[in-house]
Every structure is written in C-alpha cells, then in structure tokens.
Amino acid sequence: MTDSEAAKVYRRLRQKFGGYRRSAGPGEPTSDSVPFGNRRDPQSFADAVGFLSETMGWNANIAQAELIEHWADIVGDDVAAHTTPSGCSEDILEIQCDSSAWATQLRLMKSSLLVSLSDRFPHAGISDISVKAPGAPSWKHGRRSVPGRGPRDTYG
C-alpha cells in the first residue's frame, strides 16, 4: 500500500522536528508556557510601543517629530511666529523663515540652537540646521552641487 503525499510529509517533519510531546498535566510546570510565569505578565501599551519603536529603529524619527511639534517651546513664541520647521532630512533640520531678516537671525542663533536641540532631543540626531529664506526656489538638492551658471530664463 502506498502512502499519500501528506503522510510522507508528516513523517519527514516528525523525523526532523521530533515526535509527539506530551503536554504538562495539572501541577506540572513547563519551561516557557506557565500561564503567569516569566514574560507573560500584561504590559502597558506605552511599553509595547516603546519596545516596538526601539526594535524597529523608529526612535530618531519619533524624536524628530516631537522636535517639530514643540518648536514654539524650544525657540519661543516670537521666533516661532516667523519660522517653521519644514522637516528633517539626513539629520539636518530644515527651517523656513518668512523674511530674510528672520533667516539671518536664525543663522546667528544656529550654534546655541544646536546645543539646546541636542540637550532636549538627543535621539533626534540633528547635526546641522538649514535655514531657508522666503522667495525664489532653490534648485540645489542635497549637500553636494556642481557650481555653474544655474537655471536660465527659459520661460519666454
């Protein structure tokens, strides 16, 4: 009598991973499967999310989002009224200002601002600040660019 394919697979897996294991009876503790044993206590949702963000490597992104959210607390209401953090890319905080005077002011505050950011948000990993004044768009993307004449009038 020939065995079915399912029976062959079952025997091969049983041989590979071992046979039937008797489950522990009442009063017999097992190594990891005790109902209220080690690592089985309920955890808070905050602990679970913290563990997940740490294992997935999200801590820097979460810290950067908190930095952007608390921008007014970091720089004060006067500066925050004229500046807006537009995001973080490659560990550089990008700040958009509503006038060139405020952009100049923020560039002068850059070193003290970096120190306060690293003290308050160490996991954000901000290493530099890019301050952008309003007005013309920039065709420079990224840290490196090639010097040249740049864009010319091609709209007419």
Image: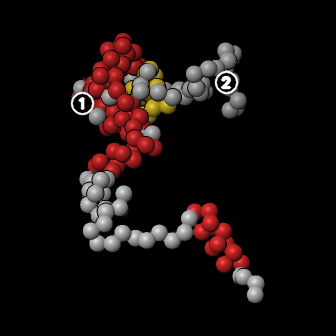
Residue sitting at 28 percent across and 57 percent down?
A: 37
- Amino acid type, callout 1: Asp
Toward the right, the furthest residue is: 2
**Of the numbered discs in the image, which one, if any, rests on residue 102?**
none
Q: Is residue 78 left or right of residue 53?
A: left
Q: Viewer-proximal residue, 144 or 151?
A: 144
Q: Is residue 24 above or below residue 140?
A: below
Residue sitting at 34 percent across and 22 percent down?
A: 118
Residue sitting at 59 percent across and 27 percent down?
A: 141
- The quarter of the picture where the N terminus appears is bottom right
Answer whether residue 155 is visible to the viewer in this image.
Answer: yes
Q: Residues within 10 Å of mark 2 (few under 14, many from 20)?
A: few
- The quarter of the picture where the C terminus appears is top right
- Element class at badge 2: loop
**Rendered location of residue 8, percent (x, y):** 69, 75
Q: Viewer-proximal residue, 151 or 106?
A: 106
Residue sitting at 39 percent across and 30 percent down?
A: 124
**Rendered location of residue 34, percent (x, y):** 31, 62
- Judging by the rendered image, the residue that carries numbered circle 2 is 151
- Judging by the rendered image, the residue that carries numbered circle 1 is 73
The colour scheme applied to this rendered structure is secondary structure
- Rounded to the nearest angstrom, the CA distance separating label 2 from label 1 is 39 Å
Q: Residues within 10 Å of mark 1 (few under 14, many from 20)?
A: few
**Rendered location of residue 126, percent (x, y):** 41, 25
